[in-house]
Image (spheres, grey):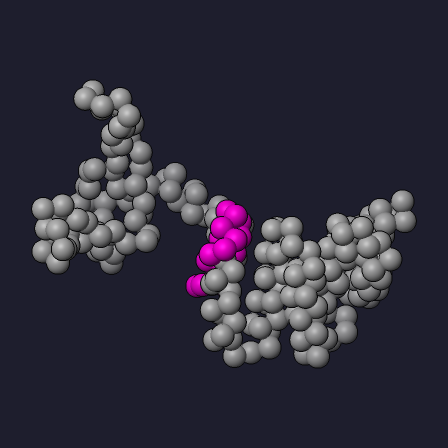
Amino acid sequence: MTIDPSKISTSITPFAMIDEHSALPQEQEILFTMHSVFRIVEITQTPSNNRLWEVQLTITGESDPQLSTLTNRIKEEIDGEGWYRMGKLMLKVGHFDQAEELYNELLKGASTDSDIAYIYHQLGWLKVDQGKYPEAIKFYEKALEIDRKTLPEDHSSLANTYHNIGNVYNNMGEYSKALEYYENALNIREISLPPNHRDLSTSYNNIGGVYS
């Protein structure tokens, strides 16, 4: 492992030697921060044991162009701030159990209706990805209940939640219920969106799919 001091930001300490505090000082343990990023330089098989591989790593700097490209791409795909952003990232990479644990903790500390509705919506999304459709509907319905009390009747968030619930019922083969929610989403979108908006096309397509 190689660490070039010139690549380390003065505002970030990527690692600390903790062998003095370890139960086994001879192991020379190193503690790395979560935001430390290393580049894989080389992977070689050890001559003495063909079951072991040696990985050469070198720390990246904030000016690393590939790291900057990756970071910017993640920012484009995963919006939000703090732990909410972390939850989205966990969902994106399929770490559903960790995401659920995080959202449940966020739910305990949520202080506004919008935050609570958002967390319920994310939990619904999580359950859809897990294929647990009845649980997904329960969470989406909780989000919808809050949004209907706090948002205007033609708000896009309501349309999106109706749309998502319709998708779940459609996946379950309960087409009459899917149609009901798809039509609710369409009614809002026809009021709030321009006639050439993509979401309107999606609603028409979903309703057509149910009838077919």
Does residue 208 belong to the magenta stretch?
no
Q: Residue at x 90, y 49 (%)?
A: 211
Q: Residue at x 43, y 43 (%)?
A: 70
In the image, residue 105 sits, relative to residue 174, either above or below, namely below
* Picture coordinates of residue 18, whole percent (x, y): 15, 54
Q: Is residue 119 left or right of residue 98?
A: right
Q: Residue at x 66, y 69 (%)?
A: 143
Q: Is residue 100 left or right of residue 16?
A: right
The answer to whether residue 189 is seen in the rendering is no
Q: Residue 205 versus residue 103: which sits nearer the camera? A: 103
Q: Residue 80 versus residue 102: which sits nearer the camera? A: 102
Q: Residue at x 60, y 51 (%)?
A: 130
The answer to whether residue 29 is seen in the rendering is yes
Quarter assignment of residue 64: top left
* Picture coordinates of residue 52, whole percent (x, y): 26, 28
* Picture coordinates of residue 16, whole percent (x, y): 18, 53
User: Residue reaching furthest right?
Assistant: 211
In the image, residue 39 sits, relative to residue 185, either above or below, namely above
Q: Is residue 121 left or right of residue 202?
A: left
Q: How many marks?
A: 0
Q: Residue 97 versus residue 38: which sits nearer the camera? A: 97
Quadrant of image for the N terminus? top left
In the image, residue 93 sits, relative to residue 86, either above or below, namely above
In the image, residue 179 sits, relative to residue 28, either above or below, namely below
Q: Main secondary structure of the magenta part?
A: helix
Quadrant of image for the C terminus? top right
Please state the extent of the stretch shown in magenta in the rendering: 81-98
